[in-house]
């Protein structure tokens, strides 16, 4: 009987893995309700899981946080569209549809941390190594990803981070104002601005980082990503900074970005370096 149960379990796992690999699977992040409300009961956190074919799986997984200034989410070119690229490298992806903060700063962080925990709870079933779970984010999603990278611990911690043209600081002189106001409120206290300025939160245990941006980004000043790289360097955190001459903001995986091929190869090379 035990052998039969084991065989059935193995078959179910194989079917489940195949389904994930083919089309991804949507899961509610908080089926019993989120711990902190953002005031909008219609705003539901979800994840979209895409697994590579079992014979190509490396055990790595990346939780992806799209950007959108903490007011909306660019779910495609900064989220779903990345899944085939990573899956072809044998890396699982979990695209996070996190809730908007509406001034309640812990809301998106709670969602991102729960997504990391969800991956580790399902690591065995999804053929993932719990010590190879990274986080990636673009723009305001980069702020969320770097918040997890610098703040989260235990099963919510990231083993590596990938940041595209990230919002890093909440300093009014350098931040993206929309992200600042939506996350902390227009009249945010200085302490909150410091607490969510992630360049100030880097320590020697911050995970390795890949940071990429454009020199002519006028939406999120390049100083955000550059200062974050400097703090990684100053704290002996392995980091790679790629600044392209042009491209502005928000290119994600779009092939219209002039340096798309270079960026993809540099990201691939970095992922293969550790």
Image (cartoon, rainbow, N blue to C red):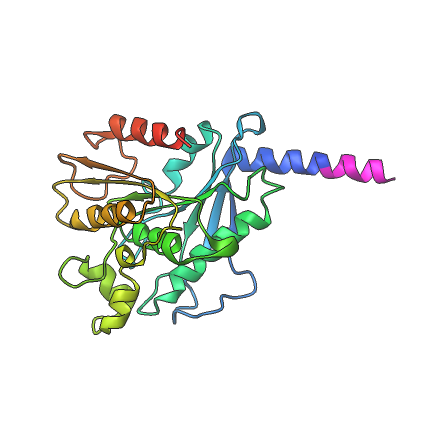
Query: What's the residue at 43%, 57% (across, down)?
Result: 152
Q: Main secondary structure of the magenta part?
A: helix
Q: Nearer the viewer, residue 97 or 176?
A: 176
Q: Quadrant of the N terminus?
A: top right
The image position of residue 32, as x and y in percent, is 56, 65
Nearest the camera: 16 or 245? 245
Magenta-tinted stretch: 1-9
81 vs 126, left or right, is left
Q: Residue at x 41, y 52 (%)?
A: 97
Q: Is residue 26 left or right of residue 135?
A: right
Residue 193 is drawn in which quadrant?
A: bottom left
Q: Quadrant of the C terminus?
A: top left
- Residue extending furthest right? 1
Residue 230 vertical position relative to residue 92 in the rendered view, above or below: below
Q: Is residue 44 visible?
A: no
At 44% from the left and 58% from the top, the residue drawn is 111
Name the spot of residue 183 as percent of width and height, x first: 29, 64
What count of labels does the image hold?
A: 0
How far across and down, in percent of the image, does residue 253 sit?
Answer: 30, 35
Residue 26 shows in this picture: yes
Q: Is residue 130 magenta?
A: no
Residue 3 % position (x, y) = 83, 36
Does the magenta portion include 5? yes
Task: Name the image quarter holding residue 10.
Answer: top right
Residue 173 position by quadrant: bottom left
Check the image and report above or below for 232 versus 180. above
């Amino acid at each position: 009987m035990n052998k039969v149960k084991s065989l059935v379990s193995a078959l179910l796992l194989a079917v489940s893995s195949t389904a994930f690999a083919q089309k991804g699977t949507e899961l509610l992040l908080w089926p019993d309700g989120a711990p902190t409300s953002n005031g909008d009961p219609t705003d539901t956190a979800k994840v979209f899981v895409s697994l590579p074919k079992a014979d190509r799986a490396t055990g790595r997984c990346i939780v992806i946080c799209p950007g959108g200034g903490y007011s909306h989410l660019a779910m495609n070119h900064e989220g779903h569209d990345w899944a085939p690229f990573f899956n072809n490298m044998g890396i699982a992806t979990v695209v996070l549809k996190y809730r908007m903060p509406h001034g309640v700063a812990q809301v998106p962080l709670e969602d991102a941390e729960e997504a990391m925990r969800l991956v580790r709870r399902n690591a065995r079933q999804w053929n993932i190594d719990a010590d190879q779970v990274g986080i990636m984010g673009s723009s305001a999603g980069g702020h969320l990803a770097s918040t997890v990278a610098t703040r989260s611990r235990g099963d919510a911690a990231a083993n590596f981070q990938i940041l595209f043209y990230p919002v890093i600081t909440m300093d009014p002189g350098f931040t993206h104002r929309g992200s600042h106001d939506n996350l902390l409120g227009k009249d945010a206290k200085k302490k909150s601005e410091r607490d969510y300025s992630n360049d100030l939160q880097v320590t020697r245990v911050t995970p390795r980082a890949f940071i990429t941006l454009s020199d002519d980004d006028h939406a999120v000043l390049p100083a955000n990503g550059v200062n974050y790289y400097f703090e990684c360097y100053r704290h002996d955190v392995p980091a790679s900074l790629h600044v392209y001459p042009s491209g502005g903001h928000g290119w994600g995986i779009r092939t219209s970005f002039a340096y798309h091929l270079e960026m993809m190869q540099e990201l691939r090379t970095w992922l293969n370096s550790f």
